[in-house]
């Protein structure tokens, strides 16, 4: 891990060049973050340049690896956040993109106070009221994201999306199968799940939507009143709305509260209803089941990719190694779902 003082000095030097004024970084501390980016909180003071003032910010700096091949680089993720912010989605303001901070790209976004750790949100008494509010809030917010006019902002040429000859489901299955072949390990339960998905594809959507790609408890900022903002847009792409709608029901995102299928905090009915009301649609529950199984398969492959980052020496990390062991839990969930 990079030393705090080294990072602070490099950040101040980079920002001085951008603002052409006095810059001071204080209270720099690492936060619990994702698997592909370092996340730091900081207070930024701009003294002699423009704009002047004090800013509470989050610095995200690329680590160098990816969970999925099509994960966005930091610049494209930053641009998607700009689009989402301009479209009135609950997103922290993306303040500045830094192409090179100690040899890696980084971005500064505004800090929103609240909790992000899923296990705390699912269990701690202080968030009891938030747990009541979140399903409806997250359903409405997801609809707002899915209504973003991605063509207006040029995202069709910038984000991964299915080719004309493939449905979103076929496109994702092809990626997962190719990825699994590259990993080169026997995973018969996962192969059975992928075969089931091939045989049971629901009707393809008439239109693609902008997908967050990782929309769930754990990737949102929450306070005692519920949803504050949506984080972690690195898996944004264009596809079938059901992919986002069902991702929060994947068992691993229940944080041990398996009885509550929506993020370990509730049943998904209120989430579905809020989304339906905001979008003016009626959800197909066969498609909901299908994409929940797809989500588990996607996460199983993501776990194996993380383990390979460790095993192949790209990034030594015990958490990544443990994900490879825990993939069996997700495979068992896939078998249960395709049997029901």
Image (spheres, rainbow, N blue to C red):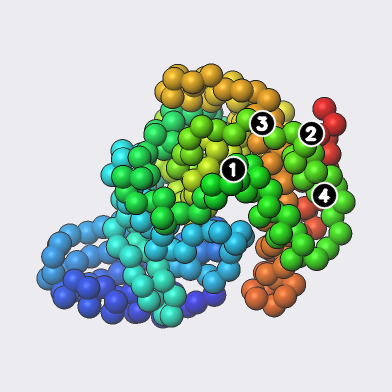
Q: CA distance from mark 3 to mark 2?
A: 16 Å
Q: Residue at x 39, y 51 (%)?
A: 155
Q: Which residue is under mark 1?
A: 168
Distance between the alpha carbons at the discs numbered 4 and 3: 19 Å
Packing grade of label 2 (10 A; few <14, some 14-19, many >=20) is some
State the residue position of label 2.
337
Question: Is residue 39 shown left or right of residue 318?
Answer: left
Crowd tier of the residue under label 4, counting other residues whose Cα lies within 10 Å: few below 14, some 14–19, many 20 or above: some
> How far apart are labels 1 and 2 at the CA level?
21 Å
| Residue 14 horizontal side relative to residue 254, left or right | left
Q: Secondary structure at mark 3?
A: loop
Task: List x then y, in percent, for residue 315.
Answer: 64, 74
Determine the secondary structure under disc 2: helix
Q: Is residue 137 above or below residue 304?
A: above
Sequence order check: which comes first, mark 1 or mark 4? 1
- Mark 3 vs mark 2: give the one in front: 3
**In 3D space, how far apart are the residues under numbered discs 1 and 4 (Cα atoms)?**
19 Å
Mark 3 touching mark 2, by CB under 8 A? no
Q: Earlier in the sequence, mark 2 or mark 4?
A: 4
Residue bearing the label numbered 3: 202
Q: Nearer the viewer, residue 296 or 177?
A: 177
Residues at discs 1 and 2 in contact (Cβ within 8 Å): no
Number of residues whose C-alpha sits closer than 10 Å to that of mark 1, classed few (under 14), some (14–19) or many (20 or more): many
> Which comes sooner in the sequence, label 3 or label 1?
1
Q: Earlier in the sequence, mark 4 or mark 3?
A: 4
Find disc 4 in the rendering and name its residue: 191
Q: Quadrant of residue 140?
A: top left
């Amino acid at each position: 891990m990079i030393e705090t003082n080294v990072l602070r000095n490099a950040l101040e030097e980079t920002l001085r060049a951008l603002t052409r004024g006095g810059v001071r970084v204080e209270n720099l501390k690492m936060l619990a973050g994702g698997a592909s980016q370092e996340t730091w909180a900081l207070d930024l003071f701009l003294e002699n340049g423009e704009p002047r003032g004090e800013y509470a910010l989050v610095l995200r700096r690329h680590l160098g690896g990816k969970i999925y091949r099509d994960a966005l680089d930091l610049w494209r993720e930053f641009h998607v956040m700009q689009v989402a912010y301009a479209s009135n989605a609950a997103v922290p303001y993306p303040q500045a993109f830094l192409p090179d901070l100690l040899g890696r790209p980084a971005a500064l976004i505004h800090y929103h106070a609240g909790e992000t750790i899923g296990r705390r949100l699912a269990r701690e008494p202080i968030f009891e009221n938030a747990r009541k509010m979140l399903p409806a809030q997250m359903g409405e917010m997801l609809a707002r994201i899915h209504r973003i006019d991605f063509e207006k902002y040029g995202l069709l040429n910038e984000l991964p999306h299915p080719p004309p000859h493939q449905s979103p489901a076929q496109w994702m299955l092809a990626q997962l199968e190719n990825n699994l072949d590259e990993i080169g390990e026997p995973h018969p339960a996962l192969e059975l799940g992928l075969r089931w998905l091939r045989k049971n594809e629901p009707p393809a959507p008439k239109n693609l939507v902008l997908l967050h790609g990782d929309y769930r408890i754990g990737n949102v900022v929450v306070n005692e009143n519920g949803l504050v903002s949506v984080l972690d847009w690195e898996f944004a792409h264009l596809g079938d709305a059901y992919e986002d709608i069902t991702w929060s029901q994947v068992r691993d995102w229940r944080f041990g509260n398996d009885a509550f299928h929506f993020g370990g905090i509730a049943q998904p009915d209120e989430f579905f209803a809020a989304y339906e009301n905001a979008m003016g649609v009626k959800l197909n529950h066969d498609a909901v089941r299908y994409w929940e199984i797809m989500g588990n398969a996607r996460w199983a492959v993501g776990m194996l990719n993380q383990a390979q980052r460790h095993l192949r020496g790209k990034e030594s990390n015990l958490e990544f190694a443990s994900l490879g062991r825990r993939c069996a839990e997700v495979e068992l969930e896939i078998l249960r779902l395709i049997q029901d």
